[in-house]
Image (tube, rainbow, N blue to C red):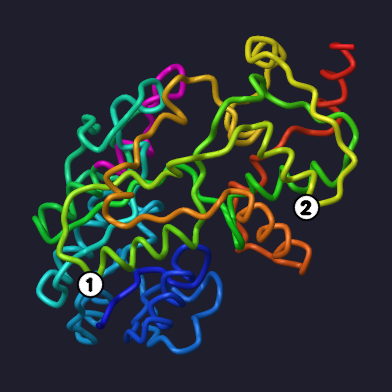
Amino acid sequence: MRILVIGGTWFLGKFIAEGALARGWSVTTFNRGRSGQDVEGVQPVHGDRTVREDLQRLAQQGPWDAVVDTSSSDFPPRDVLLAATTLRDVARRWVHISTVSVYQGWPHQPLNDASPVLDCPADADESYGYTGEDGSPTVYGFQKAGGERAVSEAFGDAAVFLRPGVILGPGEYVGRLPWWLTRAKRGGKILAPAPSGQRIQPVDVRDVAEFALDQAASDTSGSYNVTHPDGITFEGFIGECLSVTGGAGKPVWVAPDVLVDHGIAQWTELPLWRTHAGVWAVDSSRAVAAGLRCRPIAETVRDTWAWLAADGRPVDHPRWAEHGIAPEKEAKILASLA
C-alpha cells in the first residue's frame, strides 16, 4: 500500500504517517517543511500546495493508492481543487479530513451523515461565506464545505470525507485539553459549566488516524461523522483532569445563563463548553459501523497529561492563546457567586 499524506509532521498528520508505517505501508508526505519534523521512515517532499509547479513535482513521485489530506483547513476551496485535480491521475482515492462545521445545522441541531451541508463553490477563494450573528454558520464552515466539493469534483465516488467535531490527545495544538489539565493542576475552585451531566463527544487523535487509514485502504465513499459514540460527562471529564494531575481543585458548577451574563466566551474561555443544543449531538453510528473505534476519553486525558508532563510541546499555533479564561476573571466571577 502506497499513500501520500498532505501534512504529516504534527498532530493528526503525524499519527497518520506513523500509523501507516506501522502497517508496513510506503508513505510519502508533502508539506512546506516549516512546522514539525518529518517522521522517520517517510519519503518527504517539501513544497507549497498552492503552487501548481510544486504539486506537479509531487505528482512525479506517484502513483499512490490513496491521498490523506490533513492540511486543508488553512486553505480556501480553490487551493484544495488545485491539489485534487493535479493529483487525480496518480491517486486511486482521496481521504479528506473535514469538520462538522460544514453542516447547515451545526451547532444548533442534532446531526447525522445525511444532514444538509453548507453551499460553497469548489473554486471559491478565502473571502467566500459569512459568520452568523450568533457565531453560526461560519466562514470556516463554508470554506470546508467548498473544499469537500472540490474533492468530490475531482475524485467522485473515490472520495471519502471524515468530519470530526473536536480532536484531542497528545500533541494537541489548539490547547483545549491542555488548558483544562493545567487548570486542574492549579487547583482551588474551578469555574465549571453546568449541567455537570452534559455529555461531550471529543475524539482521540489516534483513533481518527486509525480510522483515516482504514478508509484509505477501503473502497467506501461518502462522509463519516467522527465523534465519540459514548462520550463523557463534563463532570467526568473535569474529574479525570483532576485525577491525573493530582490537582486539589473543586468544580463550581454554574448555570449557562449566568456564564453568558458574565461574558464568558463560549468554546474558548471555557474550552468545550457551548450552549447550542446540537454541539454534542452528532451521530457517528455510520463511522462506528465502518470500523471507528474510540478509546475511553479518560485514556485520552491521561495520555495527554503524560505528554505535557514530559515537556510535550505542540507546534506553535495562534489558536492556543485563544483558549482558557484568565485567572483574574475566573476569580472575580467565582467571588460574585459566593
> Per the image, is 143 magenta?
yes
Badge 2 element: helix
**Residues shaded magenta:** 131-145
- Distance between mark 2 and mark 1 Cα atoms: 38 Å
Kind of residue at disc 2: Val
x, y percentage for residue 94? 21, 64
Judging depth in this view, the residue of 32 and 95 nearest the camera is 95
**Whether residue 150 is situated above or below residue 2 in the rendered picture:** above
Q: Please state if 91 lies on the left or on the right of 278 as rendered.
A: left
Judging depth in this view, the residue of 290 and 249 nearest the camera is 290
**Whether residue 63 is situated above or below residue 277 in the rendered picture:** below
Q: Quadrant of the C terminus?
A: top right
**Whether residue 134 is situated above or below residue 207 in the rendered picture:** above
x, y percentage for residue 302? 69, 56
Q: Quadrant of the N terminus?
A: bottom left
> Per the image, is 247 magenta?
no
**Whether residue 108 is situated above or below residue 51 in the rendered picture:** above
Judging depth in this view, the residue of 63 and 186 nearest the camera is 186
Q: Please state if 209 lies on the left or on the right of 312 as rendered.
A: left
Mark carried by residue 220: none
x, y percentage for residue 264? 67, 22
Badge 1 element: strand
- Neighbour tally class for label 2: few under 14, some 14-19, many 20 plus, Cα within 10 Å: some
Q: Quadrant of residue 268?
A: top right
- Neighbour tally class for label 1: few under 14, some 14-19, many 20 plus, Cα within 10 Å: many
Kind of residue at disc 1: Ala
Q: Residue at x 41, y 26 (%)?
A: 107
Q: Residue at x 48, y 20 (%)?
A: 276
Which residue position holds label 1? 66
Which residue position holds label 2? 244
x, y percentage for residue 332? 86, 20
